[in-house]
Amino acid sequence: MTAAESAPRTARVLTGYRPEDGFMAVQLDPPPAEYVWHDEHAEQQEQRYGPGVEYRQWLAVDVGSGAVWFGDLDWRPSHEDLGSQLPGLPRRALGDGAIPAPGVMVQLLGHLTHDEGRGCSWRFFTAEELHALALRILPAVQRVVDSIHRIGPEDELEWSAEAATAWDDIEEATTHTVDSSGELRWPRPRTTPTPAWRIEVGAFLAMNPDLCDPSWGLATDADLDAYADYRPESGYDGVPGRMCRAADRQIEDGFTFYGHRAALYAYRAQACGGRTPTDAGVWLETTEAGRGTWEAAKPLGATLADVPDCVLEALAEGFQSAAHEEGLVLMGLTAYLRRLRAEERSAVDQQLVREAEEVERHENMLKDFRAARNRTVTRILAWSDGRSDGEIARLASMPDAYVTSWRARLTDEPTTATPSS
């Protein structure tokens, strides 16, 4: 069992943020009133508000586990530094796709209210009020936790249509008002049905099976992630956008799609028929069964570089069958084998380059030695010391006829340079 699987997934307020804990983990430090208002009746905004308006209180939600806690920001630093004080990212900074680890999101609370009778007023909340608010949103937090997409063994998080709707309910529930008597009011918690314009990519695939790519069934995590990360300059992105672009189809405007990676992983899981998707390279290189299968399947008397496509496909079928016996399906197997073959062939290419360089080096050396030998033969012939052409030819490791022809040219043309052989 992984840590993600063993962690509780119940919406709850963390220990230390409850009255019975004495609020040990929270220290609220709101600014004095004079740091909020300069002059509430001034016409110019910079004259109305003081630096205290930068003070914000927040609720934090771990959407992976359901933990909720709260705190505040120091209003004294510059506004640009406030984000570094938050334990996570605001919802609007995340978009509708993946939720970065550790999966903590922040709901910033507003403090300014407008009322026709009372005008503008600022309201900061006590620890008790923040605790009560955290309790009010727990049902919506539980909906987020229960419906958020969890991908892979590490439970990577991705928005779902229902989770995004539940977070909208959290935002609604944390927008306060003040009644005519000055009493704090929170909206009644609501459970909003997922609107029709929010579409799960999994549902889109089910409605358009002809647009699905069968290769997803054996694709690696990286390939599926890259497919889901499609970002065109215009039109829909993600899986639906890429599917429709490939099929030259159009999607009606006005929809938002959720669960791109989750849908592709679910498609692959269904295609695997209950077997565990496993990276081909990892299985073949690191497991005993994979290494044994690889050794048994090595082409006799040849490297992978010498294997044609038909043999490569037969190897892939054999590896896949062996993996099936282990309850696995190998992802990216064909691409892995082609990459290995390409690497081996690239090594052969480099070998040829080195051999050609060595041949050229030796040929250049041979030219130099041949020229030196020719000069020496010419020198000896010029002596006319009575030795025969055969004797000189044996010394030079040349045919007798070469030396005879050479001597004839020297006799006819004394100034002729060296022979060409």
Image (spheres, rainbow, N blue to C red):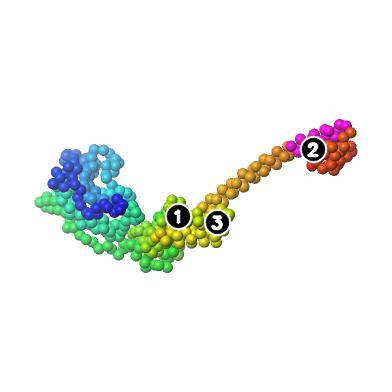
Label 2 sits on a secondary structure element that is: helix
Report the Cα–Cα distance between label 2 and label 1: 61 Å
Q: Label 3, on which residue? A: 299
Say left or right for 315 vs 164.
Answer: right
Q: Residue at x 29, y 42 (%)?
A: 84
Q: Quadrant of residue 419?
A: top right
Instruction: Assess disc 1: are there few (<14), some (14-19) or many (≥20) residues with their C-alpha within 10 Å of its C-alpha.
Output: many
Q: Residue at x 49, y 58 (%)?
A: 334
Dot placed on the residue nearer the N-terminal end, 3 or 1: 1
Q: Is residue 121 visible?
A: no
Q: Residue at x 45, y 60 (%)?
A: 322
Camera-nearest residue between 70 and 402: 402
Instruction: Assess disc 2: are there few (<14), some (14-19) or many (≥20) residues with their C-alpha within 10 Å of its C-alpha.
Output: some
Say left or right for 220 vs 401.
Answer: left
Camera-nearest residue between 46 and 244: 244
Q: Which residues are magenta?
A: 369-385
Which x, y percent locates residue 415?
85, 35
Which label sits on residue 23?
none
Q: Label 2, on which residue? A: 396
Q: Label 1, on which residue? A: 290
Report the Cα–Cα distance between label 3 and label 1: 16 Å
The image shows residue 102, relative to residue 248, as above or below, that is above
Asked whether 391 falls inside the magenta stretch, the response is no
Label 3 sits on a secondary structure element that is: loop
Asked whether 373 falls inside the magenta stretch, the response is yes
Say left or right for 67 vs 258.
Answer: left
Image quarter of the C terminus: top right
Report the Cα–Cα distance between label 2 and label 3: 49 Å
The amino acid type found where label 2 is placed reads Ala
Which x, y percent locates residue 186?
16, 54
Q: Depth-wise, is mark 2 or mark 1 nearer the camera?
A: 1
Dot placed on the residue nearer the N-terminal end, 2 or 1: 1
